[in-house]
Image (cartoon, rainbow, N blue to C red):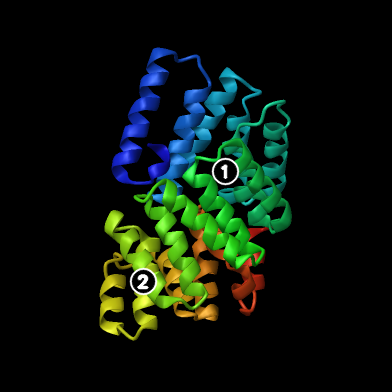
Amino acid sequence: HQWGFTEESLRLSRECLEQAIAIDPGYALPYAGLADHYLASTVADVPARDAMPQARELAERALQADYDLPEGHGMLGIVAGHVDLDWAEARRRFQLAMANSHVPWHVRQWNAYFRLFAIGSIEEAVEEGERTIDDDPLSQVNYTVLGVLYEGVGLENKARAAHEKTLELDPKFWWGWWHLGMHHAVHGRTVDARKCAEKAIAIHPTARCNIGLLAGVLQKESYTAEAQALLAQLPEGSSRAPLALTCYHLACGEIDAAMAWAVSAVDERNPTFAPSVVRAFEKRLAESSEWHTWLAKMNFE
């Protein structure tokens, strides 16, 4: 349920985790799972500034019950990096998380995607991402992440294959359709991009990244009125706008405008934005004069 990233799936995941905590309040893992619930909710458009303090508190509660729990340290590593922009602390937390004799596959995935890839250690991130597939070859999220990592190193065909595998495993996974749509859009396949964007937005019509992608593809095809009507769905002055408009301009091929909005999006502290949007398409976005502004604002070591 947790990684369906819809309002209904997240409601179900939270109910399960809260039941687990009620049955055994001293068991650490459900607290880490509920922390991950709040992280997952940011994909489904809950503002990170609302969700991530809850994730931090629950991860700390998990470590009070079991200080060696990899999921607890991993979650605090995500918070340290993407909320506090403290990448030294993120590294320390993930070192603790990865020191366990058995590293859960999703903790390895977090380290690859949220830390290594985010800071630009892209080749190392790919190695870790490939190991998660060995650990769990049936996880659609693992293939989505691997597709993002392959995109970052310029392996276009492998990226597309990974995203297609995601959707073979779960055809209703809107986040997978969005990633495949962004992939097609950036590589100039607007017809394919539009098909994917339409599937994504049909499943999650209010997701800002879906709105931005479909509007960008429509604009690229000169359907300006339709594109602007989609963007008008974003509430005026909404903090959601930078994420949507980064996707919009990236899909349009307007690199400088995309990076200008990416710089603004840092203030939202959304953990998935840096890896899934900026690092994934770094080979295009780094051409912008705003690229170094983004790097500085992210406070990378």
Residue 135 vs 190, above or below: the answer is above
Relative placement, left or right, of 27 versus 103 is left
Residue under pointer 1:
79
Residue 163: mark in rendering: none
Q: Within the image, what quadrant is residue 227 found in? A: bottom left
- Residue at the image point whose x is 47% and y is 42% from the top: 39
- Residue at the image point whose x is 29% and y is 41% from the top: 8
Relative placement, left or right, of 200 versus 176 is left
SS of the residue under disc 2: helix
The image shows residue 131 at horizontal and vertical percentages of 66, 42
- Residue at the image point whose x is 56% and y is 56% from the top: 147
Specify which label sits upstream in the sequence, 1 or 2: 1
SS of the residue under disc 1: helix
Residue 171 vs 75, above or below: the answer is below
> Which is in the foreground here, disc 1 or disc 2?
2
Q: Disc 2 residue type? A: Arg
Residue density around tag 2, few if under 14, some if 14–19, many if 20 or more, within 10 Å: many
- Residue at the image point whose x is 34% and y is 73% from the top: 215
Q: Which quarter shows the C terminus?
A: bottom right
The image shows residue 248 at horizontal and vertical percentages of 42, 73
Q: Disc 1 residue type? A: Val
Residue 194: mark in rendering: 2
Residue density around tag 1, few if under 14, some if 14–19, many if 20 or more, within 10 Å: many
Marks 1 and 2, Cα distance to the nearest angstrom? 34 Å
Q: Within the image, what quadrant is residue 70 found in? A: top right
